[in-house]
Amino acid sequence: MSALPSSVRIREVGPRDGFQNEPDVIETADKVRLIGELGRTGLRRIEVTSFVRPDVIPQLADAAAVLEAVELPDTVSVSVLIPNQRGLERALEHRARFQEINGFLSASESHNQRNVGRSIEESLTGLERTFARARAEGLRCEGVISVSFGCPYDGRVAPERVFSIARRLADAGAEEIGFGDTTGMANPVQVRAFFAAAREALPRVELTAHFHNTRGQGLANVLAALEVGIDSFESSFGELGGCPVPAGATGNIATEDLVSMLHEMGIETGIDLIALVQASRSVQQVLGRTLGSHVLRAGPVQWASPAAG
């Protein structure tokens, strides 16, 4: 086990991954206000929205309006999730408003077919074209691989299969690869071995972990990733988001839970935990229900909230 990283990078995905999973559409003005609150917490990376078909995900039909209206500090790198080249062309109409794109596919054929109606090879071919176009526009690209640790339809996914997909994405221009535990099937021993192997297989790529708290192992998996040097994570304020399989599952790990744990461990994030908890309280009020974040319920411990910087 190597020494733990002294600092980590966190991408907040709640405004996309969280909002798109809500049963009711959140008002555009509320989205803009909540994203603005997140931008004042010290977060340096926020996934603001996705240019998907409005008839498929009506919760994100206002992607262009949100992207144009939101006001964030210059220190925040704005990313948008892009499903295909058509989505990228729509996003490029607002090119000045974002710096990164995230393109996605699944590590298993069954999940990819159910999620986007394509084979993995078809998705990879499409992403290769999309990343080429995005890079020509000066955008940074992240490739996101869902169900990297296990698929609810196909079971275990061999790490080498995941790394093979990741290499194709990296060759296409992805500077960062995010590995998603989309339905919360990972365990810490598996995560530690996976990321140790990933660092060997992908030595020149930023490796990012995206864990869900479906079965309560999200933060344990974060620790396992930290122990092998992973210092980039994605999370969602309030524990919003998730995946509809299995039914009733909780969402992503909560950003405030992640930040609180890291601060207590002496790992820097640059995030003001108190301001982050307030942002989660704000989204809880908008949604009108209690959210799953532990720190939102219990409050931060006194020494877990160093000033952002």
Image (spheres, rainbow, N blue to C red):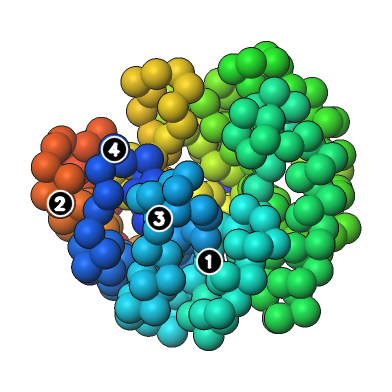
Task: Classify 26 as above or below 287.
Answer: below
Which is more toward the observer, 195 or 12?
12
User: Circle 3 is placed at which residue position?
Assistant: 60
Q: Earlier in the sequence, mark 2 or mark 4?
A: 4
Alpha carbon distance from label 2 to label 1:
23 Å
Rendered-image quadrant of the C terminus: bottom left
Residue 265 rendering spot, x and y as whole percentages: 41, 46
Label 1 sits on what residue type? Ser
Label 2 sits on what residue type? Val
Q: Earlier in the sequence, mark 3 or mark 4?
A: 4
Alpha carbon distance from label 2 to label 4:
13 Å
Relative to 47, 257 lies left or right: left
Does the rendering let one see residue 97?
yes
Q: Which mark is residue 286?
A: 2
Q: Residue furthest front?
A: 55
Relative to 56, 14 lies left or right: left
SS for dot 1: strand
Q: Residue at x 28, y 69 (%)?
A: 32
Label 4 sits on what residue type? Pro
User: Circle 1 is placed at which residue position?
Assistant: 79
Alpha carbon distance from label 3 to label 4:
12 Å
Rendered-image quadrant of the N terminus: top right
SS for dot 2: helix
Q: Earlier in the sequence, mark 1 or mark 4?
A: 4
Q: Total number of numbered labels? A: 4
Q: Which mark is residue 23?
A: 4
